[in-house]
Amino acid sequence: MLSALMVDKNFGFGTQIRKSPYFDSTVKWGATGFSVYNHMYIPRDFGSPEQNFWNLIEKAILCDVAVERQVEITGPDAYKFTQLLTPRNLSKLSIGQCKYVLITNNDGGILNDPVLLRLAENHFWLSLADSDVLLWAQGVAINSGLNVQITEPDVSPLQLQGPTSGEIMIKLFGESIKDLKYYWLKEYDLDGIPLIISRTGWSSELGYEIYLRDGSKGNELYEKIMEAGKNYGLKPGHTSSIRRIEGGMLSYHADADINTNPFELGLDRLVDLDSDIDFVGKDALKKIKQKGIKRKQVGLELNCEPLKGPNTTFWPIYKNGKKIGKVTSAVYSPRLKKNIELAMVEINNSEIGNNLKIIINHDEISSKVIEKPFYDPKKKIASS
Amino acid sequence: MLSALMVDKNFGFGTQIRKSPYFDSTVKWGATGFSVYNHMYIPRDFGSPEQNFWNLIEKAILCDVAVERQVEITGPDAYKFTQLLTPRNLSKLSIGQCKYVLITNNDGGILNDPVLLRLAENHFWLSLADSDVLLWAQGVAINSGLNVQITEPDVSPLQLQGPTSGEIMIKLFGESIKDLKYYWLKEYDLDGIPLIISRTGWSSELGYEIYLRDGSKGNELYEKIMEAGKNYGLKPGHTSSIRRIEGGMLSYHADADINTNPFELGLDRLVDLDSDIDFVGKDALKKIKQKGIKRKQVGLELNCEPLKGPNTTFWPIYKNGKKIGKVTSAVYSPRLKKNIELAMVEINNSEIGNNLKIIINHDEISSKVIEKPFYDPKKKIASS
């Protein structure tokens, strides 16, 4: 029925872009707009983005993020190879633990910023942002001399995020789920549906990621979770640009790309240049650190009417008539009641309080560098 | 003005997906629907896909294919490295020549099917289908011991395709363009706009690709070409699914993916296992060839009412109650007056004339294996 609707409405232009295992359920529950990410459709519109934001921070939302494709690394050298892919020191990554990591190329440029999951001694998943790290990893492996298998498994995550998500998870999985700590994972089975669950997300709220390990059961899983959440205010939703920008979380291609290095983003904690670990980009990152960075990510407050939606181009930033940077992500926060932005600017214009000009459609808007993250900077909400 | 319209209409969900240098012009000329390809928007709807098809085969269309991102390979070992990336023998690829190539991984799986352009002895572009071959190539380079630089240059192609495209090109570039042979390229300058032009395309019609080498001049170039074409029936358009399926041309992710090998597609001519060239996947492809393939791409004719649009899921194919394959690309050809399909089926069900069942939304449709390409199998139109 739903697939008939889709064919009649000609949703999409062919099979070049994949549909998620949750596709039919998201349409049934009201998804009206989709974007594309890792060669798949992702629902990004259930009516009002602002209502979606309130649903997230007041109760809970269920988000189809099957587009977070996994790169699975296994084999006798899987640990050594995974370490090769990231500047973060993995020596203290336990089995059952997750870490937010950067993937860098030989020049220290960022290729992706996935969550890394360690499922076993030599069994890892990289839960990806939007780029083909599968190809990167397979390429790096070619002459590495390491014995690894690198594949995309049949794994499709959901995000259950928001303050009531813990109660919904207890209803679904029992009290044991309360023992799952921030950035840890555990294997579960829901009425025969095989899952991995981690206490992670892209909302800066309390939340869980539920990794479905059988794509044929997507709609069944989605419906079970919606049913479990009906007394806890759960709403179908999508990752919230408002909340993630409030939290200063990155969107790859927007706030970071292959020409961005970790230090420009203030992510020095994700780069270990001092120990003897070996990873791609180490020499380049040492040189970048030694020379010092030329630009830096800052938070901005924009002095104009509430933005009606996120910026869809990189707005140029000026100081004294000279272009000194670009706005990478901008949105109006109805909670903070201001326009907040992530931007990349020349380092000598990055200090807090600096006044800058933004050009939006030929209009000049005044703006000021402010502290970021814009809300809950210590991530106490998500981690406690 | 146009960008204001886009912001007000909230086109897109942020800056994560890039806009083409031709974006404003395509909207001005009537683009109403966009897909996403290589992290960029591509116009795929100017009203009627069937009218776009007739425009293409009767006169000419101008298509924004800036999404065909280039991987630029330079440096003293660029030739050797480029050969490493493809099973096609490049020893006869002249400077100024192009070749359609496959990029394979270590297992012989297809990662992309770009057009390769040789701009100089050690200067190559891979004009990509939809996957991050930039990451793959940079990964392969890491321990290759070869001295190469691998980047994404500021290059954005247009396709001018159709029978009157030759006359439009003469109007723009003079009579010398007539000397440009099928699958050759030449450098041009149009009123200060730096270009590479090749006699290639994705239409199986006479056509040209015009590679803009300065992204700031996209709309200017688009308008100049539309102006030059106004007496030759030129229309704004988009790559035609109807025409490319008629021509049996592949759409990556639809008709081929990382789990598809060249032999399954009948592309043996693009794989040289007999000479001493070195490329990634050679051992695996030798083994695959020796063992023989288990499935094969075929052309199908579908016995039902004209399809209203392309398939948006992979329709399963049955024989005697057993699933034996999937439809990868399907469309109604208004010229051939039938539903034509590319499909991947078990090898013992691939012979011409074989009757098969397709399931579309629970309906059983009868179907028959027929010769492909479905129109102009020798590509005489495009190459003459």
Image (spheres, coloured by chain):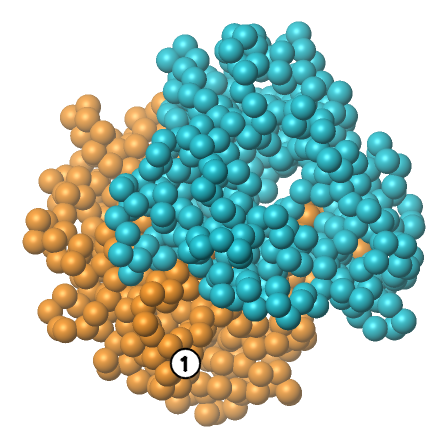
Chain colours: A orange, B cyan
What residue did someone put label 1 on? A75
B178 or B232: nearer the viewer: B178
Q: Quadrant of residue A148?
A: bottom left
Q: Residue A226 location in percent, x, y?
A: 62, 73
Q: Residue B335 location in percent, x, y?
A: 84, 32
Q: Residue A27 location in percent, x, y?
A: 67, 58
Residue at 30% over, 26% down: A364
B172 or B282: nearer the viewer: B282
Residue at 22% over, 29% down: A323
Q: Which quadrant is home to the C terminus of chain A?
A: bottom left
A73 or B98: nearer the viewer: B98
Relative height, residue B157 to residue A213 (above, below):
above
On the question of residue A6 being in view, the answer is no
Q: Residue B159 location in percent, x, y?
A: 57, 27
Residue at 82% over, 47% down: B371
Residue type for callout 1: Gly
Q: The residue marked by circle 1 belongs to what chain?
A: A
Q: Which quadrant is home to the N terminus of chain A?
A: bottom right
Residue at 66% over, 33% down: B203
On the question of residue B374 being in view, the answer is yes
Relative height, residue B334 to residue B266 (above, below):
above
Task: Please give left or right for residue A16 compared with residue A7 in the image.
Answer: left
Relative height, residue B15 to residue B135 (above, below):
above
Numbered disc 1: secondary structure = loop
